[in-house]
Amino acid sequence: MTKLTLISSAIFSVLCSQSALAATVTGKVMDDKNQPIKNASIHVHGKNQSVKSNDLGEFAIEIDANSQLHISKDNYVDSRIAVSESSNNLSVSLKPTSVETVVVYASALHKNSLEMISPVSVLSGDELRNKSKPTLGETLKGLPGVNASYFGPVSSSPIIRGLDGPRVKITQNGLDASDASRIGPDHATSSDSLAAEQIEVLRGPSTLLYGSGAIGGVVNVVDNRIPTDNIDELTGAAEYSHDTVSNSNTVAAKLETGNEGFNFHFDGTKRSGDDYQTPTFTIADDDGDVETESSVENTFIDSETLNFGTSYVGDHLTIGFSYGSIDTDYGIPGHEHHHDHEGETEEEHAEHEDEAAEEPVYAHLEQDRWQGLVSYALHNNWIETINLRVGYTDYLHSEIEDGEIGTTFKNKTTEARLNVEHKFADWHGMMGYHYSDSDYDAIGEEAFTPASVTTTNALYLLEEREFGDVTIELGARVEDYKIESQITAHEHSHDEVEIDHSDEETIGYNESFTNLSASAGAIWQYKPGHSIATSISHSERAPLSAELLSNGLHIATGTYELGLGYNIEDNEAHFEPENIKQETSTNLDLSFRRFSGDFGYTVNFFYNDIKNFYFQENTGLVYDEEDGLESAIGAHDDAVAVYQFTSKDAELYGIEFDAHYQVTPSAMVKVFGDSTRAKLKDDEGNLPRIPANKLGSELQYDLGDLQLTLTGTHYFDQNDVTAFETQTDGYTLFDAQANYQLGLGSVDAQLYINVDNITDELGFVHSSFIKDKAPLPGRNFRFGVRGYF
């Protein structure tokens, strides 16, 4: 807390500095046919101040020093204009674009989606609301380069370019989500897409701002829980929807108001649903008998979220805080305990089976999250804005077995990010400090990872400069990463029937890593609406506690997990964490983009060379509760496979694209797809659970107040598998949407119906740990109504 106090003192000392005199800048916003543009947003770069153009395209805005105006409007390419206190009667011309442009908050330098050097996708507005699902993974999986881990519809995390888990950073307003979804695929993400303003997906390494865990990419959920613009009137939204495939109901509401710079926000959601239905499929039970199923058991959800926020927004100062809570119960499919039935009578065996059926394992998730923001715009000669975000998250995930808590996962995280936006000569950039402290603990039968404290301190620098039509971007980050834990070591012996706890040994483990990251990139706007972008980056990542220290049965995935710190000798695991090397990624991206006129496209090529890639490898051993680790040959049926984290050199490369054509003013056609190849070097085989390639098309058609969308996506066969994986057949999904705008005076209302998986196709997700037990949902009708005032 001392560090945070010093940071806060430094910021508030700046607040006393003298400001320059204000001046008013006037201008007019026109289109390419010299017609005025109404309701264009004019924003002073680095300040929380903006105005709208009037019916004649005219505007007036105050500045207090040499500044930059950012002018934006839906369906037009943004414009940025340098202004001074003497600027007046500006003429701003915006060119039309075939796609919506939005500011990417995760970019740190206020770039919009067309200006980004790194590939980025943004879901916002009606598109986000129409595609929103209970999990981030299912919401985002249709984007090029993005897939989902899919542990059932309520626990599904994003996979970016074949990378998931700790390599994909999930943030809320730039701060870590701080849940346990990085520990295991059965743990749901705590970020809620229903209340989001927009969701940003940054593909490729984003380690400079977000830390060494972002080698694969960043998913940033942006909400307005700390309002950063003044709200002058009461506004709100409400939505209700029903899904037939799981008999689920969802209610969401939002209210915002403000007066004289003080702003208030509230949002909440309530979702409940039963087990989801599937097309008919077969599955083998523990005894090898084949059963026919038409649903996936234990996939219910009952969830509530509440969020409050307030802020004060002045000409220079913005200060605010928010509080959010999550309370969710959800079923965990495939979460089965292995019992030794040897010596049981048929009646006892049947009794155990009945108990398992009557008492399915489910998760209870609770999270309390506090966030704070202090931002001050100076506009002196070189410092533009000082911005401090702080967060504290108290996360609890309990797994309920037979009506009692079996395992509890806890994670308490404190995080702070201080950014100083500045200008130096012709360079514009950001320098910052990032602090994170994560106190993780797990108690119970499935506590396969010991308690640990992970602390990160980092300094970073990001700079950009324009050279005519070319903008270059340079960045670097140095990060001190420290992990502390107490390891309980016990060596399994084949002659032991019961564990003698007196033989256990506690080992104090403390290790520090210095992670260095650097990047260089450029974007060439060779003509309006056309660009080429390229970047190269070097990123280092130290192992998480789960990757390094795991030693136990992970019931959800049906495996026994060992971390990098263990060495197996004579079928015994010894904790010998020596010569643990960092995972090092060298990534190259090349993008071609067009956004002007009726035709547009984005094509991204990527190549990622990773040294010491951490992944779980089947050891050929199994774990038995009585005998410990033993050979799989001749082992008991209830024994589970032993997977150990190892590190080997790997490479991932591929392509992702989307293209669109405005056939008529009412009709648009889109084509999208991605392909990722992921393998170990030196012909050592493929990486496990890499998503299948996909190819899709979408037709959008507007009939006045009625908007229609039809989407078809084909997921190809996945035959590039490891020695212990099975191949996955391809499948094709067709989805349709219909939205109807209702005229209700001051209320903007919509009726909608979505039909997912129209043909009731049976599809298995190759990247899922339980793909054979949990296929994708069958045909689903989703009815809903939403309104805004």
Image: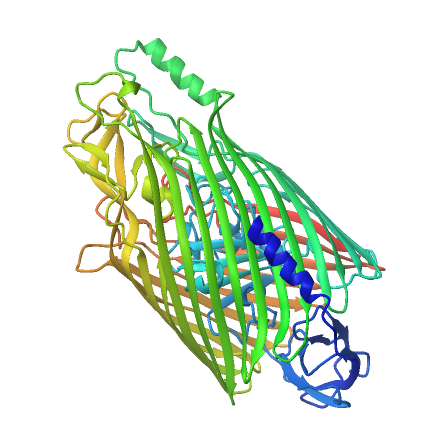
Relative image position of residue 527 (x, y in whole percent): 52, 88
Q: Residue at x 27, y 40 (%)?
A: 643
Say which of 11 and 405 sits in front: 11
Is residue 590 visible from the viewing direction of this image? no
Q: Is residue 118 above or below residue 345?
A: below
Residue 529, percent from left and from top: 55, 83
Question: How far from the left and from the top, in percent, is residue 711?
Answer: 52, 60
Looking at this view, is 170 or 296 the one in front? Answer: 170
Q: Residue 175 appears at what percent x and percent y? A: 55, 54
Q: Is residue 694 left or right of residue 33?
A: left
- Using the image as rendered, state which of residue 783 and residue 256 is in the foreground: 256
In depth, the one of 474 and 58 nearer the eye is 474
Residue 260: in sight, yes or no?
Answer: yes
Q: Is residue 780 above or below residue 352?
A: below
**Residue pictured at 51% horizontal, 54% vertical:** 435
Q: Is residue 360 above or below residue 94?
A: above
Which image quadrant for residue 714? Answer: bottom left
Q: Is residue 251 left or right of residue 409?
A: right
**Coloring scheme used:** rainbow
Q: Residue at x 71, y 81 (%)?
A: 65
